Amino acid sequence: MKSTLWSLPIYFMSLFTISASIAHQLERIMRHFIWNSSKSGNGLHWVNWDEVSRPKQKGGLGIRPLRVMNEALRTKWLWRFAKKDNAMWKNVIKAKYGIDDLDWWSKMSSFSYGVGFWKSILAGLERFKSLVHFEVKDGSRVLFWHDIWCGD
């Protein structure tokens, strides 16, 4: 199931926010697949879905909730943007939207069309910033009063 049904939406989930209803429908399809259910009748549910979706180390199949996975995949792009300096896709984003003064993040888009995926990714920026800690090094890319660089 992980190699087929679960992996199909991964690329799209890395770029776009998945709605709760779509995530629920996809997870329902996965549950039916595992439990051998069909429209004509239900299969036997030998194990609770919460137990199936546990990590492998805890006895489950390692199937993560799609909404959680969606947020993690989009957050990965923020990490890549901050860490990859010469990536072509980053240069395109920088040219299109501009960057902040310290070259960590792109600016928010002021357009209402054609930028759905980057707006979706930037929607998690504030949460991401709250989880990231900076190394000061020479101090050129860290704001002393605003960035988290020494505990709380």
Image (tube, rainbow, N blue to C red):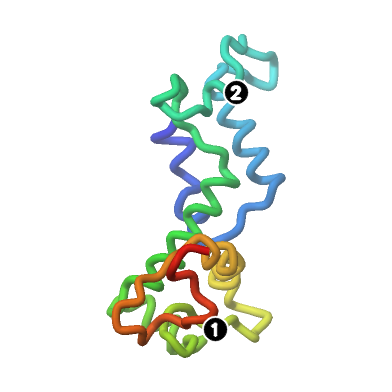
* CB contact under 8 Å: marks 2 and 1: no
Asked whether, in this view, residue 23 is left or right of residue 33, the answer is right
At x 47%, y 63%, the residue is 151
Q: CA distance from mark 2 to mark 1?
A: 40 Å
State which mark lies toward you, 2 or 1: 1
> What residue lies at 54% left-to-right and 51% top-to-bottom?
70
Q: Residue at x 56, y 70 (%)?
A: 122
In terms of image quadrants, where is residue 149?
Answer: bottom left
- Horizontal side of residue 144 vs 18, given as left or right: left
Q: Quadrant of the N terminus?
A: top left
Q: Position of residue 129 (x, y in %)?
A: 52, 67
- 48 to 142, vertically: above or below: above
Circle 1 sits on which residue?
107
**In the rendered structure, which amino acid carries the disc numbered 2?**
Trp
For the residue carrying disc 1, how many other residues have a C-alpha within 10 Å: few (<14), some (14-19), or many (20+)? Answer: some
Q: Residue 46, labelled with which disc?
A: none
Q: Nearer the viewer, residue 36 or 118?
A: 118
Tell me: residue 127, above or below residue 68: below
Q: Under tag 1, what secondary structure?
A: loop
Task: Give me the residue at 39% from left, 35% from top.
Answer: 3
Q: Amino acid at mark 1?
A: Lys
Number of numbered discs: 2
Q: Which residue is mark 2?
A: 49
Q: Position of residue 12 (x, y in %)?
A: 51, 56
